[in-house]
Amino acid sequence: MSTRVDFYILEGNGNREITACRLSEKAYKQGYKIYIHADSQQHVRRLDELLWTFRDGSFVPHEILSGAPESDNPVPILIGCDTEPAQGYSMLLNLASEIPAFYHRFERIADIVNQEESIKTAGRKRFAAYRDQGCDLHHHTI
C-alpha cells in the first residue's frame, strides 16, 4: 500500500500555518496522531504558539519534539524540524521545503502550498518526488 499524499493548494497567498492548524485540529478529532515537520526551530515555535491561538475556543493538544525520550503515551500532535519522531504517528503534515527522509513511515501526508513563488516551486519538487516514489497523490484547492 502506498502512502497517500494530499496537497492543499491555497489560493492567493493564503496562510499555510493557519491552514496547518485547522488541518491538525480536524485530523486530531478524527483520531490521527500528527507530526508537523517545520523548516527551523523558529518555525516550530511559531506553530506552537499558533496552535494555542489560531481560533477562539480551540484546544489542540501538542508538544514540541525536544530530543528527550518521548513518553509511552505520545501527545496527539508533535512539532519538530530536525529529529524523527518516535513510532505512533500516522500522519505527517509537512511545512518544510524538503521532504523529510523518514516520510515513508507515515500512512498519510498533508502538504500545504500557497501561491508564493518559492513555496510553489518547492511544492512542485516535492510533488514530483512523491510521484517518483509511487505515492498516492491527491490535490485540493482551498
Image (cartoon, rainbow, N blue to C red):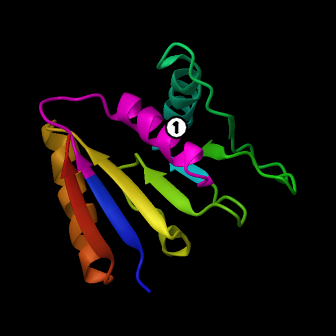
Instruction: Give the vertical position of 58 relative to 7 (above or below).
Output: above
**Residue 1 visible in the current orientation:** yes
In the shown orientation, is residue 5 left or right of residue 24? left
Q: Quadrant of residue 22?
A: top left
Marks counted in the figure total 1
- Point out the stretch of residues depicted in magenta: 8-33
The residue beneath circle 1 is 25
In this rendering, position of residue 82 left or right of residue 95 = right
Where residue 13 sits: x, y (%)? 17, 29
Q: What residue sits 52% from the left and 59% below the top?
A: 91
Question: Is 9 colored magenta in this rendering?
Answer: yes
Quarter holding residue 135: bottom left
Q: Secondary structure at mark 1?
A: helix
Is 78 located above or below residue 18 in the figure?
below
The C terminus lies in quadrant? top left
- Residue at 27% x, 55% y is 7
Above or below, 12 against 36 in this view is: above
The N terminus - image quarter: bottom left
Identity, as a three-letter code, of the amino acid under mark 1: Glu
Residue 36 is situated, as x and y percent measured from the top left of the image, at 53, 47
Q: Is 61 drawn above or below residue 127 in the view shown?
A: above
Nearest the viewer among 70 and 139 is 139
**Residue drawn where x is 50% and y is 70% of the image:** 107
Would you say residue 32 sits in the magenta stretch?
yes
Report the side of 98 relative to 138 (left or right). right
Q: Position of residue 126 (x, y in %)?
A: 28, 63
The residue closer to the viewer here, 120 or 40, is 120
